[in-house]
Amino acid sequence: LTYPCDKLTNVTPSILSKTTCRLYLQPYHPISILRNHIESHFDKFHYFNSFSPVVTTVQNFDELGFPADHPGRSTSDSYYINNSIMLRTHTSAHQRQAFQTGTEKFLISADVYRRDEIDTCHYPVFHQMEGAQIFSINKAVEEITYDMQKTASQQNHFINTYDKTAISSTNPVQPCHPVEAVNATISHLKYSLNELVRKLFIDEQNLQVRWVDAYFPFTSPSWEMEIFYQEKWLEVCGCGVINQDILNNAGQPDKIGWAFGLGLERIAMVLFNIPDIRLFWSKDPRFINQFTSNEIIKFKPFSKYPSCIKDLSFWMNNDKEHEFHITNFCEIVRDIAEDLVEDVKLIDDFKHPKTKKRSLCFRINYRSMD
Ligand code: DAH
């Protein structure tokens, strides 16, 4: 397919070349192994694995209730093919399509695209898995009780879970939802995700998990789930009770349900011990050949070069129309230096006392993975 370009077009050939890779479907790729594990946990769900990464801005934003001025819509955050067509920034873009098929529980795995800064855990393409399950509003309590009894945990692996979240006016229940139905939906959501984490991290001793309140335009109440890894809390998942408008518009007005979006790289980096997100794109046999079955195994590093630092500074243009965004700069760095760059940090921000001109200095760390 060809699309006309316009003022918003900001996709580059190198980004477009990633849209055909589909790492999440490549046999024995860590992202695909992880997808398989999660799919086997959500048994009897419908798995959507071939939605196109090219979506309309309506699918990616409007249908999900993003306001017109939401920062996610800006060309410094998202990849536009033109004013109305873009690369999806999240798997939630397909929620409506999925619900419209009539399914009551599904997973959607896909590559998603965001303009971002460069470091060891950010890459302009990554993978997400969207999950959702809906119940009859009138029979939610019975349906959920039955489901939870049926799937009651057989596991005795222990994890520390902290949950100090609370329903409040800043993270409210939707007025259209009966209290019992929404409470049952919330416990089912938290139970399903806690069980998933417990299963995935069966070999991690003393794993710590916490729930924090969050905000998303398409859920209320909303939360994030974080895991403690290498001395910091990593956000691995956003979730919540689906905004009723979404279900109404998808032809499911008598249902209530939950949804989540998992970041697959974050989880795979922890599980497989993969230290740098660029490795997922490596074609080096020393990487690929370490994964030859559907098992989760620890990656063995095969190469570590010292960093090679180059500092780059430049004067900024003062006019509003050419406002500087670090993501634009990072895009140029990735285009020119490709995956040789491990991270980019702003190390100085200078304003000339007399001329008032501003200059920035970036430290670019080149380190080959191979
Ligand atoms: N789409 C969100 C993101 O990419 C993640 C997310 C949050 C997905 C809440 C959901 C959800 O389905 O209910 O940041």
Image (cartoon, rainbow, N blue to C red):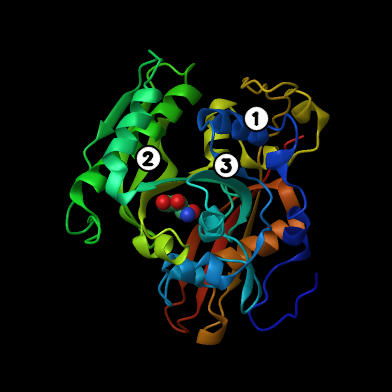
> Along the polypeptide, which appears first: circle 3 or circle 1?
1
In the image, residue 124 lies at what x, y percent? 63, 55
Residue nearer the viewer, 302 or 163:
163
Marks 3 and 1 sit apart, C-alpha to C-alpha, by 18 Å
Marks 2 and 3 sit apart, C-alpha to C-alpha, by 23 Å
Question: Residue at 45% of width from left, 69% of height from top?
Answer: 71
Question: Residue at 51% of width from left, 33% of height from top?
Answer: 42
**Residue bearing mark 3:** 46
Residue 361: name its quadrant: bottom right
Q: What label sits on residue 120 in the rendered view?
A: none
Question: Residue at 80% of width from left, 69% of height from top?
Answer: 1
In the image, residue 294 lies at what x, y percent? 68, 23
The C terminus - image quarter: top right
Q: What label sits on residue 33 in the rendered view?
A: 1
- Is 58 situated above or below 262? below
Tag 3 and tag 1, C-beta contact below 8 Å? no
Residue 159: name its quadrant: top left
Tag 3, which secondary structure? strand
In the image, residue 118 lies at what x, y percent? 59, 52
Identify the amino acid type marked 2: Met
> Along the polypeptide, which appears first: circle 1 or circle 2?
1
Question: Residue at 70% of width from left, 57% of height from top?
Answer: 334
**Residue bearing mark 2:** 225
